[in-house]
Amino acid sequence: MFINRSDELLRLNSRYQTHKAELYVLYGRRRVGKTELLREFCKEKAHIFFVATLSSDADQLATFSQQIWQFTHTSVAEGFTFPSWEAAFAALGELPGRPVVILDEITYLIAGNKAIPSILQKVWDGVLSRSSILLILCGSYIGMMEREILDYQAPLYGRRTGSELLLPMALPAVPYFFPTYSAIEQIETWAVLGGMPYYLSLFQGQLNLFDNIRTHILHPKGTLYDEPLLLLMEELREPRNYFSILRAIAAGRTRLNEIAQAAGVGDGRATSRYLDILQQLKVIRRVTPVTEHQPEKSKKGIYQIEDSFLRFWFRFVHPYRGSLDLELSNAVFNSRVQPVFDSYVGYALEEAAQAFIARLARQGNLPFLPERIGRWWTNHEEIDLVATSDVDKTILVGECKWSSKPVGINILEDLQRKTHLLRAEGDWQQVHYALFSKSGFTPELQTKAQSENILLVEPLDLVAETPPSRF
């Protein structure tokens, strides 16, 4: 099932329509939907779609050679193979028309033959750059793709005409997978799985979310039970220390010294090295208060797990593997997951709120042009959502509540109190307020919001592809 990705398809088609040599790099984590996107793009286009495997270099060359042969022949040339990768790549320059050639999982090719990037660079410079080919290099190992293909020291550096890190889908894609779920259930599902198409496709719409969690994540035979182990062991040679760090972050240890102490992997310097690698792999991110103008130098930075599913797994699966291996998934769910599930989803709601404001801005439905969107905090106070514009001297502040009670005026008043502290850090002359709620808003707050132009956002607004603007 191919869902959404219209922007990504548009970018690929724009490369195809140039009718000149294009070397495009598409990379991203396993399960993010790279292959499905490329197969959709290739429909009704003359193409070679080569998927590398872990077989020998000679077998890979033979398979690739057969696909090149079949591009221009209806018969199968038994035993035909090019004498070398250089000859095979050079043959791509002789293909007729506007050929699309995809080398999927190219990191497997490189693992079997380290010279592949250099060979491809030589053939690109000598032959392919003067052809009409659209060559797409696709890979899942982010670290290797950046090191072997994109890095300034890599042989292919400077040759690519475009590249994209394919990201998980945004929240409004979830209703396509679960049309019978309510908006609340769709947000909760996204809080657990994030926007990874493969994960979303595994959950069954006829089951409720909690049953899906028990079946696919918490049960030892569940498809996603070992998924993060497989994912990280492919990228990391010694994953044990990285797992300890991720578990510490998932448990709320977000500062460097807290992580080092909780994970027990060495001092701050050693922990920093592990954190740097996890950031390079896009597994975690370092965030600072949105008001920090030099975040890379800020001492207020904290670390967060970037992917929702990894966050859920390291919070609720990894610490309880012993019990789960004994098939006590129901007990783990009832005692460890369900009691804190709303607070867990509340964290995801903050991310959804920030993405919602960004969508409004892209659609031109904010009363100002934001320069930064994020959170703000001090040692004693925190605001879930802050969008700032120094040029317009304007900020938008928001509070997120994922609870069974409607949000009332007291929440707005507390947000206004904290905003007074925030404004001491900048020259913002105008303030807009937004409130995000699982369970709606009290009548008194609705009346006040209408008269004072306060944005009230409910679950249906968050999952909508085109969110309504009430400014």
Image (cartoon, rainbow, N blue to C red):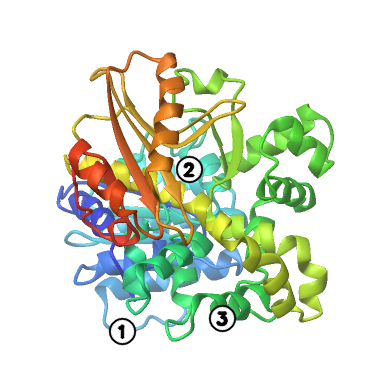
Q: Earlier in the sequence, mark 3 or mark 2?
A: 2
Q: Nearer the viewer, residue 312 or 338?
A: 338
Question: 21 or 295, which lies in front?
Answer: 295
Label 3 and label 1: CA atoms lie apart by 51 Å
Q: Secondary structure at mark 3?
A: helix
Instruction: Kindly identify the residue that appears in the image at 28 percent across and 64 percent down.
Output: 4
Residue 286 spot, x, y in % from top left: 56, 34
Report the disc number at residue 149. Answer: 2
Label 2 environment density (alpha carbons within 10 Å; few <14, some 14–19, many ≥20)? many
Residue 156 spot, x, y in % from top left? 44, 39
Res. 164 in view? no
Instruction: Give percent across and percent down for residue 353.
Output: 38, 47
Residue toward you, 14 or 426: 426
Using the numbered discs, state the Cα–Cα distance from disc 3 to disc 2 in whole angstroms.
42 Å
Mark number for residue 211? 3
Residue found at x 53% / y 63%: 192
Left or right: residue 363 versus residue 323 is left
Cα–Cα gap, marks 2 and 1? 35 Å
Res 239 seen here:
yes
Residue designated by label 1: 75
